Amino acid sequence: MELTMKMNEKYKDDGLYFRARHRAERLRKFYFHCIIFLIVNVVISLFKVNRNVNNGESFSDAVWDLDTFIVWIIWGIVLLIQTISVFGLPFILGKNWEEDKLKQFMDEDESINLKK
């Protein structure tokens, strides 16, 4: 508690503490979402495989049924969108992607201007 008070006082003026706290909360929610994703999907998959086996399917047919994976796929897309929102586009493209592209475009423009 005392550390939080000191940090709050130190960064109060420029808002760094509040932005960092907001990012930490979003990261915590993301990790919680990942854990819930795994637990719920494993339980649903086990239930569906058990149901399919009891309906006369072989175990491998029951496991590889699309119905078993559809929740994983749809919820996985939602989790991917959250991953991008939490970690940002640099998570996919790399930290220096934008700067590298700007340099590439400027080099291309410069080479075109030199040819003229």
Image (tube, grey):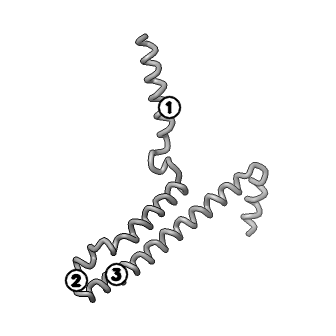
User: Which image quarter: residue 51?
Assistant: bottom left
Residue found 55% across the figure and 57% down from its top: 86
Residue found 48% across the figure and 25% down from its top: 106
Task: Return the mark for residue 57.
Answer: 2
The Cα atoms of the two marked residues, 3 and 1, are separated by: 50 Å
Residue found 75% across the figure and 59% down from its top: 8
Nearest to the observer: residue 88 or residue 81: 81
> Which residue has dot 3 on it?
48
Q: Nearer the viewer, mark 3 or mark 1?
A: 3
Looking at the rendered structure, the kind of residue marked 2 is Glu
Cβ–Cβ under 8 Å for marks 3 and 1: no
Looking at the rendered structure, the kind of residue marked 3 is Lys
The Cα atoms of the two marked residues, 2 and 3, are separated by: 11 Å
Q: Secondary structure at mark 2?
A: loop
Q: How many discs mark residues in the rendered view?
A: 3
Q: Residues within 10 Å of mark 1 (few under 14, many from 20)?
A: few
> Is 96 situated above or below 80?
above
Q: From the top left corner, tell me how far across and down residue 9 is, in percent.
A: 78, 57
> Which residue has dot 1 on it?
102
